[in-house]
């Protein structure tokens, strides 16, 4: 029989909310957010950071955030550079000019 590498979780131990993976809750002046750090190792797409309007290339560690509660959903996820996410209260989002 194969060895089990992780100890079994007791049934009464709290689990992360369903559908949110390992996201953590953050509260700031701009509301409540669910935030997840992405290592970048498994990313294969380009994303556009709403903080600086620059590309986040595949393989780049970044932050995924979306509003929590009844006003937000996973469809509202945005991918941010870690610095842009942490400094969002000191600057406004960059808007594209077409």
Image (cartoon, rainbow, N blue to C red):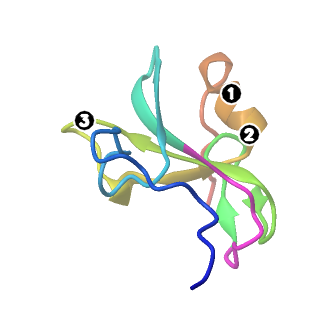
Chain part drawn in magenta: 36-45
For the residue pair 45 and 51, the one nearer the viewer reads as 45
Q: Which mark is residue 69?
A: 3
Q: Residue at x 75, y 63 (%)?
A: 40
Of the image marks 3 and 2, the number of the one nearer the N terminus: 3
- State which quadrant residue 81 falls in: top right
Q: Residue at x 37, y 38 (%)?
A: 67
Q: Tell me how far mark 2 sits from mark 1, CA to CA.
A: 6 Å
Q: Position of residue 6 (x, y in %)?
A: 59, 59
Indicate the position of residue 11 as horizontal and vertical percent values. Answer: 29, 47
Measure the alpha-carbon separation of dots 3 and 2.
Answer: 23 Å
| Image disc number at residue 86 | 1
Q: Where 31 sits versus 97, above or below?
A: above
10 Å crowding of disc 1: few (<14), some (14-19), many (20+): few
Would you say the residues marked 2 and 1 are in contact, meaning their CB atoms lie under 8 Å apart? yes
Element at badge 2? helix
Q: Quadrant of the N terminus?
A: bottom right
- Helix, strand, or loop for circle 3? loop
Q: Main secondary structure of the magenta part?
A: loop
> Could you say which is closer to the camera, residue 32 or residue 91?
32
């Amino acid at each position: 029989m194969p060895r089990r590498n992780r100890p079994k979780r007791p049934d009464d131990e709290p689990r992360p909310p369903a559908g949110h993976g390992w996201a953590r809750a953050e509260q700031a002046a701009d509301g409540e957010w669910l935030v997840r750090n992405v290592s970048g190792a498994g990313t294969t797409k380009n994303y556009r950071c709403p903080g600086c309007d620059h590309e986040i290339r595949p393989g780049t560690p970044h932050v995924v955030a979306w509003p929590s509660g009844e006003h937000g959903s996973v469809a509202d996820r945005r991918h941010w550079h870690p610095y842009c996410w942490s400094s969002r209260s000191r600057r406004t989002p960059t808007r594209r000019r077409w």
